[in-house]
Amino acid sequence: LEMFAAMDKFNQRRARKAAAAGVAFKGLEIGTGINTGDCVVGNMGSEQRFDYSVLGDAVNLASRLESQSRAYGVDIVIGEATARAVASRFALLQLDLIAVKGKAEAVRVFTIVGDAGMADNPAFQRWQAANDALLVAYRAKQWDTAEARLGECRTLAGEALGERAPDGLYDVYAERIAGFRRGPPEQDWDGVYRAVNK
């Protein structure tokens, strides 16, 4: 969260300089994937190629989560184990149930919206409850209810975060619901989104 706050200040400085110089400005954007689990960390390799590296299934999932940050329109995507570990310290919003590329099993993924102060904010709590209701309706294939919750989530996200609200997240669900209205999912659909990109 501190890194993203610093990046915002950095982009503001760059935007002012670009405006003063009369040149176009494109802000720096990054995405972060965080996961918790066992891994191997250290110097690895041979004389031909030697690196300090991190290896393991948990690391691979973190990398896949990072690449999903753009798709969901959020800065940070965290895995379920990480969410459990930090739930009392941060404001978390569930994003999806996703099977990332190269994995068969699905994981529940979340984003970190803010610190504990944000978690205690009634505006965030209303948004979080509406977001959870959206996901329940979506996974139950209740498209009308899910669409109604979408509108509610957009409004409540704006109340909680202002212009930082993740509209892209709800664009994703609007697009999926429209697609399922055209071609309904299988009868035994489990609500899992299967990512096709790394």
Image: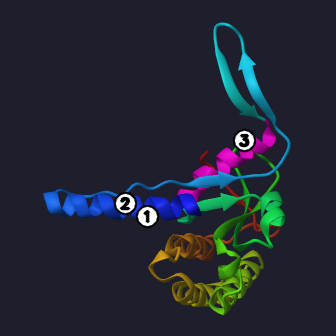
Circle 2: residue type: Asn
Q: Residue furthest left?
A: 22
Q: Residues within 10 Å of mark 2 (few under 14, many from 20)?
A: some
x, y percent for residue 176: 59, 70
User: Does 79 appear in magenta?
Assistant: no
As helix, strand or loop, the secondary structure at mark 1 comes to helix
Judged from the image, the secondary structure of the residue bearing numbered disc 3 is helix
Residue that appears at 66% across and 83% down: 143
**The quarter of the displayed image where residue 150 is located:** bottom right
> Going 66% across and 68% down the picture, which residue do you hit?
112
In three-dimensional space, the C-alpha distance between marks 1 and 3, rounded to whole angstroms, equals 28 Å
Q: Amino acid at mark 3?
A: Asn
The label on residue 11 is 2
Residue 113 coordinates in the image, percent (x, y): 62, 72
The residue under label 1 is 8
Is 145 rendered above or below residue 188? below
Magenta range: 56-70
Quadrant where the N terminus sits is: bottom right
The vertical placement of 85 against 64, above or below, is below
Circle on res. 60: 3
Q: Pointers 1 and 2 in contact (CB under 8 A)?
A: yes
Which of 132/84 is in front?
Answer: 84
Query: Going from the N terminus, do you reach mark 3 or mark 2 first?
Result: 2
